[in-house]
Image: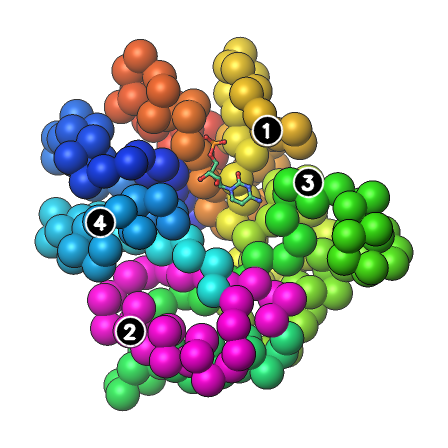
Amino acid sequence: MKDVIIACDFASAEETFRFLDRFGELRPYVKIGMELYYAEGPQIVRELKRRGHKIFLDLKLHDIPNTVKKAMSVLSRLDVDMCNLHAAGTIAMMEAAREGLTRADGSRPILLAVTQLTSTSEERMHEDLLIEGKIGDVVVHYAQNARKAGLDGVVCSPLEAGMVKAACGKDFLTVTPGIRFADGAVGDQVRVTTPVQAREIGTDFIVVGRPITAAENPVAAYKRCLAEFVG
Ligand code: C5P
């Protein structure tokens, strides 16, 4: 189950395929975000599926329950493996999303909730969003709401994954970006862990972008991530 997901933060399908072609027979799990999806549309998902990749479609839905339910049913037909929404949309929205995602045969992609974005500081959460308390408590509360709504897990910082597992159970998935090699550049990420630390914390999937996409040898960097995280 544990896996390394490469964040394909590219501007076009052409750039994405040029990058993935370097992996030869390897078919890494990939994350498609808003930039690539809005640029290329559902065809990029179909083409990557055809090539044999598993796909985390990171579109972070947040709207009224009925709209999210219908949008999720479209994503389900696209046959993505994992998708997500904002827990801030309420338990009712998350339940509607889960229903929309569920296919006639009862199967569905993994559904994750984003709790508080890691770009939101505790100060901004208090002053801009008028949410009181510790940000860690809010993350855990949102994760518990996601669990109540029948979701599979959350996207969170590796440093929050332990708290989420303690509150929601070890089977509740944590998918964690903010991964850097011990000897690598941190870039704009603030709270980072290495793949080895992420494994020790017990997170289920790591999402890795620039340490692989900007590496001189992306395939070697991907294999190093797999070796350190999955073993
Ligand atoms: O290049 P890097 O490894 O920092 O990429 C991390 C990926 O995870 C990016 O696609 C980024 O948008 C995403 N992400 C994140 N922090 C979050 C949620 C998503 O870095 N809290």
Above or below for 98 versus 190: below
What secondary structure is marked by label 1? loop
Q: Residues within 10 Å of mark 4 (few under 14, many from 20)?
A: some
Q: Is residue 229 magenta?
A: no
For residue 112, side relative to residue 15 (left or right): right
For residue 40, the mark is 4
Q: Is mark 1 within 8 Å of ligand 1?
A: yes
User: What residue would you read off at disc 2?
Assistant: 74
Identify whether 132 is placed above or below 100. Answer: above
Q: Position of residue 100 (x, y in %)?
A: 39, 81
Q: Which numbered disc, 3 or 4, marks the residue closer to the eye?
A: 4
Task: Name the residue: 41% across, 53% down.
Answer: 58
- Residue type, label 1: Gln
Residue 52 in view: no
Q: Position of residue 230 (x, y in %)?
A: 43, 37
User: Of tags 2 and 4, which is closer to the observer?
Assistant: 4
Q: Amino acid at mark 4?
A: Glu
At 45% from the left and 75% from the top, the residue drawn is 68
* Residue 134 x/y as whole percent: 85, 51
- Quadrant of res 216: top left
Q: Is residue 63 magenta?
A: yes
Is residue 25 visible to us here?
yes
Give SS at disc 2. helix
